[in-house]
Amino acid sequence: MFVLSLSFSRHAFRKVVWRSSQQIWCELHEEAFAHFGGVPEWIRLDNLKEGIIEPDIYDPELNKLYAALLQYYKIIALPCRPYAPDLKGKVESQVSYAQGTALKGKRFESIDDQNAHLMHWDERWASTRIHGTTKRQVREMFEEERPSLKPLPAARFEYYRIVERRVHFDGHIEIDGAYYSSPSRYVGTKVVVHAGRLFVRLIDPLNHQLIREHPIAQGKGFRRTAADDLPKQTPPQVEKLVARIATLGPSCAAFARAVETERGALALRTLFGVLDLARKYGPDAINRACTMANAANSSRYRFLRTYLQHHAQPKPLAERHRIIGNMKTYVDHVSTLTQRQQGELFDDRR
């Protein structure tokens, strides 16, 4: 059971959850703020791992997600000193009060029924009682305390995961199968990544400054590349590959130019993949696949490969090749070497 209590009026928010985590802990705080209709200036919290990573008398370390939530709501955190339960007596008494009054001897069909009962009990009983310490009604004191709360922000906090990623040599990091660009100076190093529902942020691990922010990609294999992260000029090798692919057909030329425009120097691997598909399926098949890709406004190699796997047959292996000799030539050569080795062995025995 999560309990957050206002220290002046003792008005409290209570909710039962099946499990706890960093995000659930933060979401419960937001629900409490919405319940109160405002945000406090500071909050005193216990040293749970969801809030405090490393308890310390002088320098406690807050969980990064929880710290970001408090910063968003402009709340000052005051963690309790380790082994000092007397500092959080107001909320500890609220827990025991709810357990001994609202929940004692009761069973519920579901956790939602239990929370609905707690909300009804708080409205009809806990908030209307005369508090034993203040000797005043909790609701009456809350009405006096309400103007001291700061207004709620227009939107709730946007949750995200905090992970580390190494910047690949193509200047991108990978999150959930999608790729996001980083400035070239971070290639080969690790960066901190905030992966949210709508955004991906790259953070410098040393100075904690924002490096780059991208909207979330559409799915696996997609890329988000900032214009500032692209090379200033397209390397000649990319231009040569585009010209080579253009000889396969007009649709292939349009596809290659779209890849070059979108990715610049990062288009090399995709262009090599197009040439590999052309060798495997032939120019006619790859041109049909590029026609479909252009119509679908897609510049992904995976689109071409999937289309060809379902709508084309690989070319049969050639029996002869201009740089590979006739098979009889190799047979005669092996026979000559075998006879020579046998002759040398016979001379040694003599």
Image (spheres, rainbow, N blue to C red):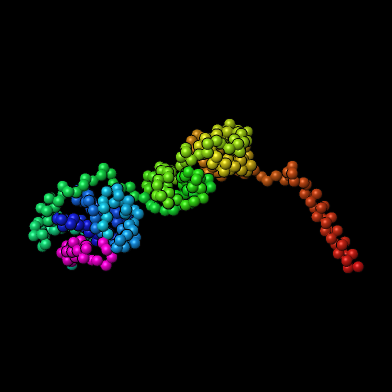
Regarding residue 233, the answer to whether it shows in the image is yes
Instruction: Find residue 320 and report its horizontal and vertical position in percent.
Output: 74, 44
Instruction: Find residue 80 and report its horizontal and vertical position in percent.
Output: 26, 61
Helix, strand or loop for the magenta stretch, by majority = helix
For the residue pair 211 and 121, the one nearer the viewer reads as 211
Tell me the quarter of the image containing the C terminus.
bottom right
Residue 233's place in the image compared with 146, above or below, is: above
Tell me the quarter of the image containing the N terminus.
bottom left
Whether residue 314 sits left or right of residue 167 in the image: it is right
| Occupied quadrant, residue 108 | bottom left
For the residue pair 153 and 176, the one nearer the viewer reads as 153
Q: Residue at x 43, y 49 (%)?
A: 204
Residue 294's place in the image compared with 2, above or below, is: above
Per the rendered image, the range of residues in magenta is 80-104
Whether residue 279 sits left or right of residue 183 in the image: it is right
Whether residue 109 sits left or right of residue 286 in the image: it is left
For the residue pair 336 and 11, the one nearer the viewer reads as 11
Regarding residue 195, the answer to whether it shows in the image is no
